[in-house]
Image (cartoon, helix red, strand yellow):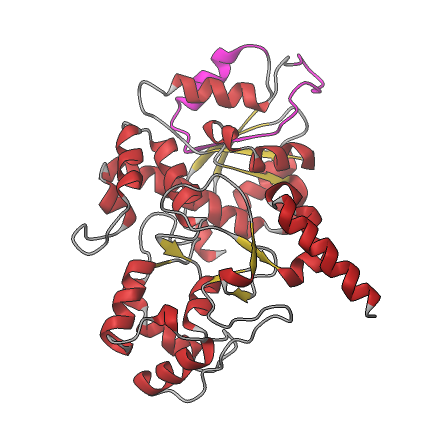
Amino acid sequence: MEFLKKMAYKILYIDDQDTASRKADFEELGFEVITHDPTNDFKEIELKVKDGINALILDYKLTEGTGEQACFDAPTIAQFVRTMHSVDGFNIPIVLMSNQTNFTDYYNNDYTSQDLFDFTITKQDFVSNKEIFGQKLNSFISAYQKIKSDNNLSKSLGIDESKIILHSRFISDYEKLNNNHFKISSLIYDNLLCSIGLTIGIDVLSARLGISQDSDNWPQVLESLKTASYTGVFSDIKQRWWMDKVNKWWNDSISSDTSIRRLNAGERVELLNSKLGLENLIPLIKTKHSLSSNFWTVCKFSKEALDPFDGIELLKDYLPWQEKEYISIDSALAGQMEVYKNQISAIDKKAIRELVKNERANG
């Protein structure tokens, strides 16, 4: 909380209900807050947005106020603000906050909505996780500002161009955005840092090293890997590592002869204990229905280490620099196949149903 109170970003909060309580919450997080009871006069919104605000937070339904009722909802305002700044480049983060879970879920899952909102949250989740929300909003605001001031992809990502190899498609996608800070932040946050590929998170890092995060010496391993850490925009809320640098670390510090991908978890841990002078690294173990401990990814649901060979591939539109995602057979048998049913092939669905049938028959 102390970190947040040092920030003095100005936000505009638009809601047609009583805003006093939410305003107090935002102020407690260290923000300067302007509220607005929406009417049908967009000029009022335009003037407030141009008054140097750093972020815009919108309730979804804006048509139920006690005064002059607006005849539009949050997406209309978000589109108006995005269009208004499409020429002058004065982009700001826009957040959807609503009591309606179905609205926030829709805009979280529908990628076409990325032209509107940076992220969405229910009011219930906000109340439960105020500090996390404050950290995230601060991170988005500062990311926008850094992207604008840097005007350079490598600087925004915190990398030396000669030491990190970015996918050519990622670079070309960035160049096509013509310095649109909103779309650049979305490219980096949604398509680089929230996927497996050029960067990886701590669960995938653990899987690829074969090390349980419960190991006493896990912090020492992370310290050894410090040079591989992602340090660009959003690094304050997204702990990531450059896979290219992890491979270099392995080659320079662990083994230049043996690829990490060829070893199982036990072999990786044995080598890591030896080369790093450690004793208490614990190898990860397979899930019940896995055959291989040559882990390289994690189950999308359980986050347990997984060899893609043992996983059920989730079908979606992956970008060229992104790796495929999977759920484990164990998660599918535990009922998660229904959650991901639109991303699982008919063949895999049939195989899992047969496995469920056989397990039930065998007690």
Q: Residue at x 73, y 57 (%)?
A: 354
- In the displayed structure image, the side of residue 252 where residue 320 appears, left or right: right
Q: Main secondary structure of the magenta part?
A: loop
Q: Residue at x 29, y 59 (%)?
A: 244
Observer-nearest residue: 249 or 258?
A: 258
Q: Residue at x 45, y 87 (%)?
A: 280
Q: Residue at x 47, y 17 (%)?
A: 80
Observer-nearest residue: 297 or 189?
A: 297
Residue 200 percent location from the top left of the image: 40, 57
Residue 174 percent location from the top left of the image: 29, 35
Location of the C terminus by quadrant is bottom right
Looking at this view, name the residue that lies furthest to the left.
162
Residue 16 percent location from the top left of the image: 65, 23
Q: Is residue 246 visible?
A: yes
Q: Is residue 305 above or below residue 146?
A: below
User: Residue 82 appears in which quarter of the rendering?
Assistant: top left
How many numbered dots are placed on residues in this image?
Answer: 0
Q: Is residue 8 visible?
A: no
- Write the start and end of the magenta stretch as one range: 40-69
Residue 130 percent location from the top left of the image: 58, 49
- In the displayed structure image, the side of residue 135 where residue 91 appears, left or right: left
Q: Is residue 209 above or below residue 60?
A: below
- Is-magenta flag for residue 152? no
